[in-house]
Image (cartoon, rainbow, N blue to C red):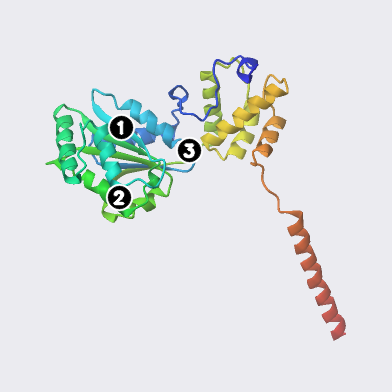
Amino acid sequence: MSYIEHFQLEREPFSNAPDARFYYNSEQHQQALLRTMYAVDSSKGLAVVVGGVGTGKTTLARRMLDCLTEDRYQSSLLVMVHSGVTPEWILTRISLQLGVDNPAPDRLTLLKQLFDRLLEIDESGRKAVVLIDEAQMLQTRALMEEFRGLLNLEIPGKKLLNMVFFGLPEVEDCLRLDEPLAQRVAVKYRLRSLTCDITESYIQHRLQIAGATYPIIPIDIIPDIHTFSGGVPRLINTICDNCLFEAFLRKHDRVDKQIVHSVAGDLGLLPHPASSHFVSERAEEDFDDIDEMLDSLENRL
């Protein structure tokens, strides 16, 4: 038996694998999506979504891709898995995903192919959109210059290609490698950690989607989960998943505070008090100072 069966759930509620069924439309994710879709629909060129590790950037990128319906957009999502990509690879990959047949090995010829394809997309009444996830991996000036060149593919009064970067805060450093590109960011939105109230709604949402029929994770222990996770969705998932498994092992019908603290300890998320060794060393230093002061006073007397 798994904890899914133990709690009579339909599916695993706190997996960190992308799953559109569990998308939680928090206020900030809704705002980020509204702004990036505005940038695309207004042909602004470049938008950027920045957030810390685990704040939901990839989830948002996939959600946005789902919103870019084929009847109105020609879209693609590229995930940068390492920093060794080249401008040639980027240009070829974007061309392929936007529908260029047999991309030419020669850069100038390929740019002409891509421009012609972008004109076809525009004439069909659609917009070309490229989403770049893990954009902080684009760490060279040459790559930034390549993206700036792609944004220059336009006709009078309209950009033919729109791009949205999703990345860690370091993506801003990448953009500054090419200042003219940094100045072309039309829309920027920063994702932050969830508040305690939103964490509560987030957890309840995921449990409901998973088919929970009663509060497996009671409301009164959610502040502890929020504290240990820092409001980061990925950590919230990890803590809750481990809590459900631990409750299953203990044959409990719900998670309690003791389980949350035990899981947080196992995951290394408990606060780290100053080490006793450090305290004892400081205490010895203080006593040495006091002895020196007493010796000095005795000498004076």
Residue identifier under label 2: 144
- Tell me the amino acid under the disc marked 2: Met
x 63%, y 19%: residue? 2
Quarter of the image containing the C terminus? bottom right
Which kind of residue does numbered mark 1 sit on?
Ser
| Mark count | 3
- Where is mark 1, residue-wise? 76
Residue linked to disc 3 = 55
Side of 211 where 151 appears, left or right: left
Residue shown at the point (49%, 38%) measured from the top left: 54
Nearest to N terminus: mark 3 or mark 1:
3
Q: Quadrant of residue 212?
A: top right
Q: Is residue 281 visible?
A: yes
Q: Tag 2: Cα neighbours inside 10 Å, few (<14), some, or many (≥20)?
A: many
- Visible residue check, residue 184: no
The secondary structure type at the circle numbered 2 is helix
Q: Could you give the CA–CA distance between mark 2 and mark 1, rounded to whole angstroms?
A: 19 Å
Q: What is the three-letter code of the residue carrying label 3?
A: Thr
Counting residues from the start of the chain, the first of labels 2 and 1 encountered is 1
Tell me whether circle 2 and circle 1 mark residues in contact (CB < 8 Å). no
